Image (spheres, rainbow, N blue to C red):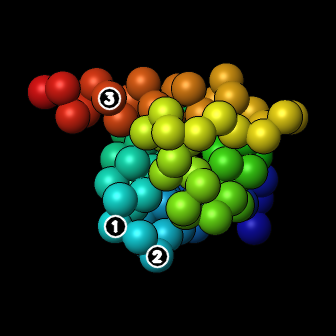
Amino acid sequence: MTAGEDLSMRRKMIRYRAWHRGTREMDLVLGPFADAHINDLSAEDLDRLERVMSEEDPPLLKWVLGQETPPEGFDVAFLARIIADHRARIAK
């Protein structure tokens, strides 16, 4: 397998995981984000997305909804991209 094929497979796996989180609410946040942006994300951004997705759904949803603040050291800049994408979709 080439590096391009590895990256393509990685993108497919991340996209699948974004839609199959365990809670429908997070599926509807991360799934559309992955659909819209997965092919444009660099390997570094894929790492960042995977780190966000490694969080449990309940706290992640609270962060997305602005009910709680992510912990110190969390990648809030990347989370902000996901939140902005979600808000733009629900505003339509």
Q: State the quadrant of the N terminus.
A: bottom right
Q: Is residue 54 above or below residue 88?
A: below
Disc 1 residue crowd, few under 14, some 14–19, many 20+, Cα 10 Å: few
Residue 36 visible (yes or no) = yes
Q: Nearer the viewer, residue 10 or 59?
A: 59
Whole-percent x, y for residue 21 in the image: 49, 70
Q: Secondary structure at mark 1?
A: helix
Determine the residue positioned at 51% across, 47% down: 62
Q: In the rendering, which numbered label is found on residue 24?
A: 1
Q: CA distance from mark 1 to mark 2?
A: 7 Å
Give the labeled residue for mark 2.
22
Amino acid carrying mark 1 in the image: Arg
**Residue 15 as seen in the image, left or right of residue 73:** left
Determine the residue positioned at 74% across, 51% down: 51
Ranked by sequence position, the earlier of labels 3 and 1 is 1
**Residue 49 as seen in the image, left or right of residue 80:** right
Ranked by sequence position, the earlier of labels 3 and 2 is 2
Asked if marks 3 and 2 touch (Cβ < 8 Å), the reply is no
**Residue 39 as seen in the image, left or right of residue 47:** left
Q: CA distance from mark 3 to mark 2?
A: 21 Å
Q: Is residue 42 above or below residue 21?
A: above
Determine the residue positioned at 50% across, 39% down: 67
Determine the residue positioned at 39% across, 48% down: 29
Whole-percent x, y for residue 59 in the image: 60, 55
